[in-house]
């Protein structure tokens, strides 16, 4: 039987020598010990799919879907394989060619979710409705009454992953009198409606260090989840909206306090590489994008950043440590808080299982990774967990609550804000 090749760019895999260095870095391989759940195995599947030697099937797509796209493999690859671009190319090809049709309900849910994230007005409306679960006291009742403990495991898990829509929204602080720089803050989609107070903490810390935080009202979702899901056309559209919005703001830096968003924004040049009208603009935009910890490390010298007496452990988000290669900066910033003790956990940079919407799409693997992470956290005896990505924060918080632990999970900027206040 002749199989029509599923044409997509496999160039990022050309330098793969199949050495296996990626195996022990891959979270899904660590759990399953299956070659097909490793970067090397998936690269082989993608190459054969592109060449027309393998047929696009539900089973093959399942192996690709179970990839977290955490890019830990890239950090250890001696050949510099661009695995993140490769997995996005393959997923986009499967979606664009409808190679493995989804069921009607699954297709509808997927379109609705991604469409909502891309529309700030719809997202605000849905978040407002969902916030009633917390604001009416229903969530507190469900937990205090013991009802949650009697829910089936799957529902209890989903309840634990319910975003904190009741948290305060972003409130920009007054600008400093003589700013040393102008920066814009990416508000994003879920981060905007569920962790607005983290944005506020980011802006306050920047302002204390003399940076004017410029409002960019026409910005929109960064498109990371769309790109990861293979919806490349929509990811490109969102990128263009953001590029134009931030160009108009005329800032020195675009500061991001969500690691997954930051990694995607820095890849806008790759995303729009085949668009002559936008490629150079995308590259110029990406050059200004800075994770908040990366940016703060360039601003604040070596002086102490306040005082806070506590013991914390740091959970390194994949898209910060692996995709952006930012690892020392968050720890260095925490180390400059007087009275704070940093207790390192085992496997700090192994994925927690959140990975965008992975914890909803692949619950079994996600939960297994979450439990591995919670074991490492508990072993430190820390008073709090610190991270730098909202998905990781939500995933870790749900795992701690499932164990009956009240350990708070904080963003790095929340800790800095409290220490400096």
Image (cartoon, helix red, strand yellow):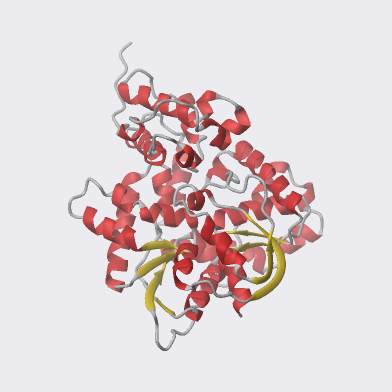
Q: Residue furthest left?
A: 276
Labels in figure, total: 0
Q: Could you tell me which quadrant the C terminus lies in?
A: bottom right
Question: In the image, 410: left or right of 230?
Answer: right
- Position of the N terminus, as image quadrant, is top left
Q: Position of residue 22 (x, y in %)?
A: 50, 33
Q: Seen from this angle, which residue lies furthest bottom? A: 177
User: Does the image show residue 229?
Assistant: yes
> Would residue 19 be found to the left or right of residue 398 on screen?
left
Task: Pick whichever, 131 or 67, lies toward us.
Answer: 67
Q: Depth check: 220 or 369 in front?
A: 369
Q: Is residue 34 left or right of residue 42?
A: right
Q: Residue at x 39, y 27 (%)?
A: 46
Placement of 339 over or under 105, stated as above or below: below
Pick whichever, 341 or 258, lies toward us. 341
Q: Quadrant of residue 108?
A: top left
The residue depicted at 38 percent of the width and 56 percent of the height is 265
Q: Residue at x 60, y 69 (%)?
A: 336
Q: Position of residue 188 (x, y in %)?
A: 44, 62
Whether residue 167 appears in this view of the structure is no
Q: Residue furthest top?
A: 1
The location of residue 196, given as percent across then percent down, is 53, 69
Measured from the top left, where is residue 119 in percent x and y?
A: 40, 60
């Amino acid at each position: 039987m002749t199989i029509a090749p599923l044409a997509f760019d496999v160039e990022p895999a050309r330098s793969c020598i199949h050495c296996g260095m990626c195996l022990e870095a891959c979270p899904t391989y660590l759990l399953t010990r299956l070659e097909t759940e490793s970067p090397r195995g998936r690269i082989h599947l993608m190459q054969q799919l592109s060449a027309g030697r393998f047929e696009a099937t539900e089973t093959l797509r399942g192996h690709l879907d179970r990839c977290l796209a955490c890019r830990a493999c890239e950090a250890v690859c001696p050949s510099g394989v661009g695995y993140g671009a490769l997995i996005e190319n393959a997923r986009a090809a499967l979606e664009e060619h409808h190679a493995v049709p989804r069921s009607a309900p699954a297709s509808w849910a997927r379109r609705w979710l991604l469409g909502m994230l891309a529309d700030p007005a719809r997202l605000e409306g849905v978040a407002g409705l969902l916030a009633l679960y917390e604001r009416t006291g229903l969530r507190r009742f469900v937990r205090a009454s013991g009802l949650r403990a009697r829910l089936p495991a799957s529902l209890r898990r989903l309840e634990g992953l319910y975003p904190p829509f009741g948290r305060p929204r972003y409130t920009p602080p007054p600008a400093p009198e003589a700013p040393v720089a102008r920066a814009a803050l990416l508000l994003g989609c879920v981060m905007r409606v569920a962790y607005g107070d983290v944005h506020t903490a980011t802006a306050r810390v920047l302002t204390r260090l003399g940076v004017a935080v410029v409002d960019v009202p026409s910005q929109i979702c960064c498109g990371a989840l769309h790109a990861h899901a293979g919806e490349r056309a929509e990811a490109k559209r969102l990128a263009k909206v953001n590029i134009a919005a931030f160009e108009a703001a005329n800032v020195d830096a675009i500061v991001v306090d969500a690691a997954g968003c930051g990694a995607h924004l820095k890849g806008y040049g790759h995303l729009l590489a085949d668009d002559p009208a936008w490629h150079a603009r995308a590259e110029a935009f990406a050059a200004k994008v800075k994770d908040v910890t990366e940016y703060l490390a360039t601003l604040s010298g070596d002086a102490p950043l306040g005082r806070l007496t506590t013991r914390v452990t740091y959970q390194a988000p994949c898209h910060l440590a692996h995709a952006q290669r930012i690892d020392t900066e968050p720890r260095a910033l925490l180390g400059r808080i007087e009275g704070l003790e940093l207790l390192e956990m085992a496997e700090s940079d192994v994925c927690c299982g959140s990975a965008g919407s992975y914890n909803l799409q692949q619950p079994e693997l996600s939960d297994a990774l979450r439990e591995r992470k919670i074991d490492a956290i508990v072993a430190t005896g820390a008073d709090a967990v610190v991270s730098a990505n909202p998905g990781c924060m939500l995933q870790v918080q749900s795992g701690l609550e499932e164990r009956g632990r009240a350990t708070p999970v904080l963003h790095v900027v929340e800790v800095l804000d409290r220490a400096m206040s």
